Image (tube, helix red, strand yellow):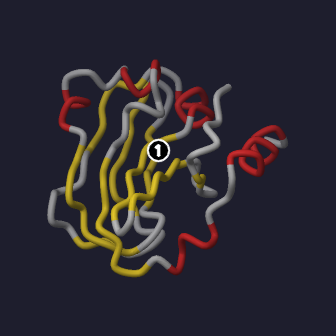
Amino acid sequence: MNFPDNLLYTSHDEWVLRDGDIITVGISDFAQDALGELVHIEMPEVGAKVDADEMVCEVESVKAVAEVYAPCSGEVIAINESLEDDVENVNSAPYDSWLFKLRISDDGPLADLISAEAYKAKVADS
């Protein structure tokens, strides 16, 4: 499994890339592997305001439906529209297939995100 060092990870198995006051969020390689073949993603609305740890979207696989949570409070400023037709890209390239971007309004909860090394250790115990 792949755990890029330039990303941070949540306890809900999302990956986060921060660029100033914008974060990009997707699901980790571990999460997509556990879910199996993805068949649908219910994306959030652009402009939606979300709170930290609030469900933002859902990913549906042949095995289950999983919720994707906001790692911090903010406003959804973009969704990855290309996944509407090619949801399987999340399985083949989870770190290239981001789900949504947030403009941060409160970055306090981002302090709870963990490094790639810590995340790798966490999922090894799963």
Horizontal and vertical percent for residue 96?
Answer: 41, 31
Image quadrant assignment for residue 109: bottom right
Image quadrant assignment for residue 11: bottom right
- The amino acid on which the numbered mark 1 sits, given as a three-letter code, is Ala
Q: Residue furthest front?
A: 20
Q: In the picture shown, does residue 63 fall above or below 72?
A: above
Q: In the picture shown, does residue 122 fall above or below 82?
A: below
Q: Residue at x 54, y 70 (%)?
A: 110
Q: Residue at x 60, y 52 (%)?
A: 9
For the N terminus, the quadrant is: top right
Considering depth in this image, is 32 or 113 the residue closer to the camera?
113
Considering depth in this image, is 5 or 78 the residue closer to the camera?
5
Horizontal and vertical percent for residue 89?
Answer: 37, 22
Q: Is residue 116 left or right of residue 96?
A: right
For label 1, count other residues whose C-alpha is less than 10 Å away and answer few (under 14), some (14-19) or many (20+). some
Considering depth in this image, is 98 or 22 the residue closer to the camera?
22
Q: Residue at x 81, y 38 (%)?
A: 124
Is label 1 in a helix, a strand or a loop?
strand
Horizontal and vertical percent for residue 24?
Answer: 38, 52
Q: Is residue 56 left or right of residue 66?
A: left
Image quadrant assignment for residue 126: top right
Question: Which residue is label 1 attached to?
Answer: 66
Q: Residue at x 37, y 32 (%)?
A: 97
